[in-house]
Image: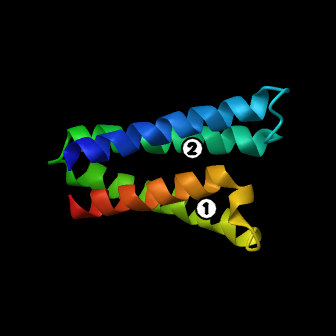
Amino acid sequence: MKWIDTLFAWALVLLGSAHFLAAYVPKLSVLLGPWSGSAAVAIVTMGLMNAVRSLHRGDSFLRWATAAATGLTAGLCLGVLYQFQGNVLHQPAALAVGALALIEVFFAVAG
């Protein structure tokens, strides 16, 4: 299970990097504005926190701080998806990050 936890953490880092790239490459123009860049930084930070947590299993402060940060980010993603109730597939980044964040919250709380 540890390798799945680490894999999902690095997947979040990759998704955050792709989010950042999509925000600032004009040809892609999928996401616009500074909110996309700041969301990308939050996703990458959350992924790195989960990657560090997966390596240091005994640190309970790191575990709960990562669970809180990941839970807040998952809530933000679910909030974005709530705005697009008709077809959540129009926001694949929020769907993917939200799903991975919920899985990482489970890993963080389970220890």
Q: Label 1: which residue?
A: 76
The numbered disc on residue 42 is: 2
Relative placement, left or right, of 4 versus 48 is left
Numbered disc 2: secondary structure: helix
Residue 92 location (% of width, % of height): 65, 52
Estimate the spatial distance between the alpha carbons at disc 2 and disc 1, rounded to whole Å: 11 Å
Q: Residues within 10 Å of mark 2 (few under 14, many from 20)?
A: some
- Above/below status of 49 relative to 21: below
Q: Residue at x 69, y 29 (%)?
A: 21
Q: Residue at x 20, y 41 (%)?
A: 56
Identified by mark 2, the residue type is Ala
Q: Residue at x 38, y 59 (%)?
A: 103
Identified by mark 1, the residue type is Leu
Numbered disc 1: secondary structure: helix
Q: Residues within 10 Å of mark 1 (few under 14, many from 20)?
A: some
Corner quadrant of residue 7: top left
